[in-house]
Amino acid sequence: MPGDGPPAPRLAAAFAARLGIAFDDPGLLERALVHGSWFHEHPDDAPGHNERLEFLGDSVISLVVSEALHARHPADDEGGLSARRASIVNAKGLARLARRIDLGDAILLGEGEARRGGRARETLLASSFEALVGAVFLDRGWDGVRDWLLHLAAPELEANAPAGTLKSPKSRLQELTQRTGERPEYRVVQSSGPAHAMEFVVEVVVAGEVVGTGSGSSLRIAETAAADAGFDLLGRRATHRPVDRGGGPGPDAS
C-alpha cells in the first residue's frame, strides 16, 4: 500500500468519508478494520485487531433490530419476531449489509486470508460488520448507531414476508423431526486450518442416520449447511412416502 506509516489510519479515513460518519476517535474505526490475520503478520502496525469490537457489535445489532421489528410487527408472536431477526442478523444477512457499504474493500487482511478470498467470505464480512457497528456505537452513542443501522438495513426491516418462511434451516429441521419424536444431533467430523481461518465439517444425525453434511468457516455455518441438507433429504422422503392403505380393521369392525 502506498504512503508512509501504518496503513490502518489511511484506510479508516477513506472509509469514514465513504460512510459519511465523522468519528471523534478515528482509532476505533481503525481497529474495527484490522482482521486478526493481518494483525498477526503486522503486530507493530496497529494497537490490536477487531475481535473485541465484534463482540460488542453483535449485541448492539441484535438490540437495534429487535426493537425495530417489535415496533413494526405488532401481530407477530415471539417465534415470528425471532425468525425475522435471525434472517437479518445471521451471517448471510450481515454479510449482505457489509457488501452494501463495500466493507470488504476496507478490511486489512493477512496475505494468506486475502489469497483465500477472505474479502468475499460471508463469515469474515459478517464479523467485520459487527466490529464496525461496535466502533460506531462507542464513538457515536446509541442514537447515532441506531439511526445509521436503521437506514442501512431499511430494506430488510421493512420486508413483510410471512414469519414462517424466514425460519432457519436448523429450526425447520427440528420442527420436521419432532413429528416423529426425534431430535437432530450435530457432530463435528473435521476441523482444520489456522485459528483465524478455521474450516469445519459437520454432520447431522437423526434416529442414528446421517441425513446431512455441511462445511463452513464457523460451526454455525457448517451446522446450518448440514441442517439444510438434512431438511431437504427428509422433506423429499416425506413427500414421496406412500400412503398407508392399511390392512387394519375397517370402519365396521368391532
Image: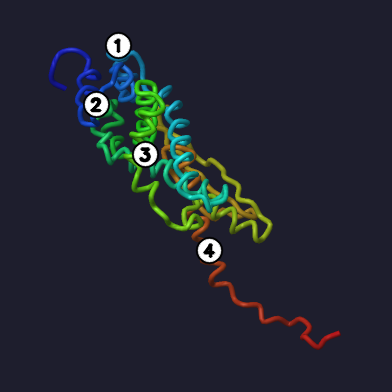
Q: Residues within 10 Å of mark 2 (few under 14, many from 20)?
A: some
Q: Are marks 3 and 1 in contact (CB under 8 Å)?
A: no
Residue type beneath disc 2: Ala
Q: Residue at x 77, y 86 (%)?
A: 250
Earlier residue among tags 3 and 4: 3
Under circle 4, the secondary element is helix
Q: CA distance from mark 2 to mark 3?
A: 18 Å
Q: Is the image coloured rainbow, by chain, by secondary structure, or in one colour?
A: rainbow
Left or right for 226, reference 102:
right
* Nearer-the-camera pick, 240 or 91: 91
Q: CA distance from mark 3 to mark 4?
A: 36 Å
Report which quarter residue 110 is drawn in. Answer: top left
Under circle 3, the secondary element is helix
Instruction: Mark yes or no: residue 138 visible.
Output: yes
* Nearer-the-camera pick, 252 or 68: 68
Residue type beneath disc 4: Gly
Q: Position of residue 217 (x, y in %)?
A: 41, 38
Q: Residues within 10 Å of mark 1 (few under 14, many from 20)?
A: few
In this rendering, which labeled residue sits more in front, label 3 or label 1? 3
Q: Residues within 10 Å of mark 3 (few under 14, many from 20)?
A: some
Report which quarter residue 15 is drawn in. Answer: top left
Task: Name the quadrant of the C terminus.
Answer: bottom right
Q: Which residue is mark 1?
A: 44
Residue 150 marker: 3
Earlier residue among tags 4 and 2: 2
In this rendering, which labeled residue sits more in front, label 4 or label 2? 2
Residue 16 marker: 2
Q: Which residue is mark 4?
A: 235
Left or right for 114, reference 213:
left
Q: Residues within 10 Å of mark 4 (few under 14, many from 20)?
A: some
